Image (spheres, helix red, strand yellow):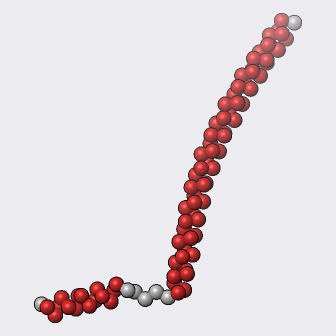
Amino acid sequence: MANAWNQTFRMKGLAVGPMITSEYSEWRLEADKLRKGKNKAEEELDSLKTNYKKLRLSMRTVKLRKNSEQWLEEIREERNRSNC
């Protein structure tokens, strides 16, 4: 029983410190940097989409206001034409 425990302990000791090459470390740092950049870009894209939707809504609202004024003007013109 004690022999089995020693084997497990030794195996854990070996697994604690995996060998990592400098190339792997550089690759890992670059991958992390790219991942962070991608996340930031996605957040900015979401923000831009939200701002675009708000802008479109406000443009539509302004356009409707102009249209209502234009409609009133057209109605006046039609009334003037029909009265003549």
The quarter of the rendered structure image containing the N terminus is bottom left
Residue in view at x 30 percent, y 88 percent:
13
Residue in view at x 51 percent, y 82 percent:
25
Vertical relation: 35 (above or below) 50: below
Extreme residue in the left direction: 1
Residue in view at x 62 percent, y 42 percent:
53
Horizontal and vertical percent position of residue 40: 57, 60
Q: Kindly indicate the quadrant of the structure image that contains residue 84.
A: top right
Is 25 on the left or on the right of 56, as rendered? left
- Which is nearer the eye, 21 or 48? 21
Extreme residue in the top direction: 83
- Which is nearer the eye, 15 or 78? 15
Q: Kindly indicate the quadrant of the structure image that contains residue 71.
A: top right
Figure label count: 0
Horizontal and vertical percent position of residue 65: 70, 25
Vertical relation: 35 (above or below) 22: above
Residue in view at x 53 percent, y 71 percent:
32
Horizontal and vertical percent position of residue 26: 55, 81
Q: Kindly indicate the quadrant of the structure image that contains residue 6.
A: bottom left
Is 3 on the left or on the right of 41, as rendered? left
Extreme residue in the bottom direction: 3
- Which is nearer the eye, 77 or 50? 50
Horizontal and vertical percent position of residue 30: 57, 75
- Which is nearer the eye, 73 or 11? 11
Is 80 on the left or on the right of 41, as rendered? right
Is 6 on the left or on the right of 28, as rendered? left
